Amino acid sequence: MCASALVSAEPVIHEESGIEIQFPEGWDYLVQGSSLASTSPDQSVHLLVLLSEQQVVEYFTDAIAQEVSQIIELPEVLVEQGLIEVNELLQFRAEGAGLYQGEIVDWSMAFVAGARKSVIVLAFGQLEEERPVVEEVFDMIVMTEPQPEETVD
C-alpha cells in the first residue's frame, strides 16, 4: 500500500506527548482531552492515541496487557513484534485479541517513546482488511519537536 492512499490532508498533533499522527483518509477523528480517537468510515475499526503510564520502552514489554486492558477486556497478546526505531522514535509493537463491548476483536498497538511523553496507539475491531493501513499509521508517527537535551551543571 502506498502512503498516498492513507493519510488525511493535515497531520494531527497530540500536544501533550509531542507526536504528530496522520489518520487514514475518510476516517473521522476527535480530540478528547489528552486522547485522540479515530474511526474507519464503516465503524469497523477504531484507533486511539492514549498517554501511557510507562515512559521507558524497556519496561513496557511487561505491561502490554495492563496498558491494552484500559480499552480491551481480557487482552491476549498473540504476537510481539518487538522494538523498532521509526522516525527517530522507539516503538514496541504487539498484536492480539480480546473483548470490546462484549464482542471479540483483534487489536494491534504501538507503544511510542522518545517524544515529550510516551503514548499507546491502539487499533482494534475487525482488522483483517485494515491491518496494512494501521501499520502505515504506526510507521508515519513523528515527533513534533525534538526532545531537549539534558545538560549537566
Image (spheres, rainbow, N blue to C red):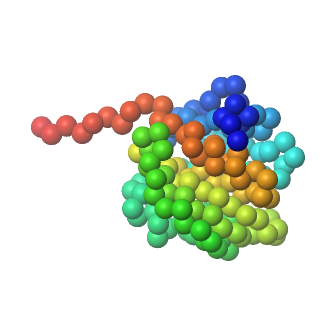
Write the residue at 66% across / 67% down.
Answer: 96
Q: Is residue 9 above or below residue 70?
A: above
Write the residue at 57% across / 43% down.
Answer: 139
Extreme-top residue of the structure: 9
Q: Residue 39: image x %, image y %?
A: 77, 45
Q: Locate residue 24 relative to residue 147 in the image: left or right.
A: right
Q: Quadrant of the N terminus?
A: top right
Extreme-left residue of the structure: 153
Q: Residue 151: image x %, image y %?
A: 19, 37
Identify which residue, 4 or 152, lies in the foreground. Answer: 4
Write the residue at 55% across / 40% down.
Answer: 141
Q: Is residue 112 above or below residue 28?
A: below
Can the viewer see residue 63 in this picture? yes
Q: Residue 81: image x %, image y %?
A: 54, 62
Q: Quadrant of the C terminus?
A: top left
Extreme-right residue of the structure: 42
Identify which residue, 34 or 59, lies in the foreground. Answer: 59
